[in-house]
Amino acid sequence: MVCETAFRSEDVPAADRFRYWRDLMMQTIAPLELSSDHADNFRASMHLLELGAVDVWPRPCSRCAPAQTFT
């Protein structure tokens, strides 16, 4: 069975979008740090598809640079 969850940066005020997206990525994907030259006008969406033990997520968004962090 496939479970799909949608996330959109437009669901929060523009001033909070990049921080919201960064926090969301850390919670749903992996510990990472994001940076973007478009943080003031950041837009992104994600559909998380849960396929049993595998998660798949296409990631259209404003330009940003992910960097994995290790804890």
Image (cartoon, helix red, strand yellow):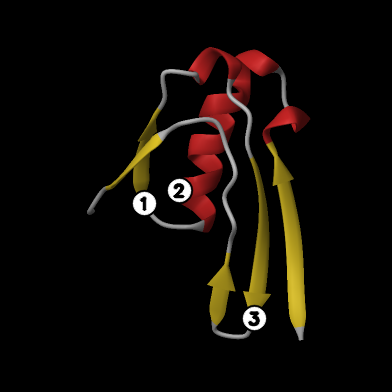
Please identify the quadrant where the N terminus is shown. bottom right
The mark closer to the camera, 1 or 3, is 3
Label 3 sits on what residue type? Answer: Leu
Q: Quick one: SS at disc 2? A: helix
Among the two numbered marks 2 and 3 on one chain, the one whose residue lies closer to the N terminus: 2
Near mark 2 (Cα within 10 A), the count class, few <14, some 14-19 or many ≥20, is some
Q: Closest to the observer: 64 or 22?
A: 64
Residue 21, position in %: x, y?
Answer: 56, 36
Q: Which residue is mark 2?
A: 26
Residue 25, position in %: x, y?
Answer: 50, 47
Residue at 26% across, 48% down? 69
Badge count: 3
Q: Closest to the observer: 54 or 31?
A: 54
Q: Which residue is mark 1?
A: 31
Residue 60, position in %: x, y?
Answer: 60, 44
Label 1 sits on what residue type? Answer: Pro
> Can you tell which quarter of the image residue 5 is in?
bottom right
CB contact under 8 Å: marks 1 and 3? no
Label 2 sits on what residue type? Answer: Met
Residue at 41% across, 18% down? 37
Among the two numbered marks 1 and 3 on one chain, the one whose residue lies closer to the N terminus: 1
CB contact under 8 Å: marks 2 and 1? yes
Determine the CA span between mark 1 and mark 3.
21 Å
Among the two numbered marks 2 and 1 on one chain, the one whose residue lies closer to the N terminus: 2
Near mark 3 (Cα within 10 A), the count class, few <14, some 14-19 or many ≥20, is few
Q: Which residue is mark 3?
A: 51
Image vertical order of residue 71 relative to residue 56, above or below: above
Determine the CA span between mark 2 and mark 1.
5 Å
Residue 23, position in %: x, y?
Answer: 51, 39
> Can you tell which quarter of the image residue 54 is in?
bottom right
Determine the CA span between mark 2 and mark 3.
20 Å
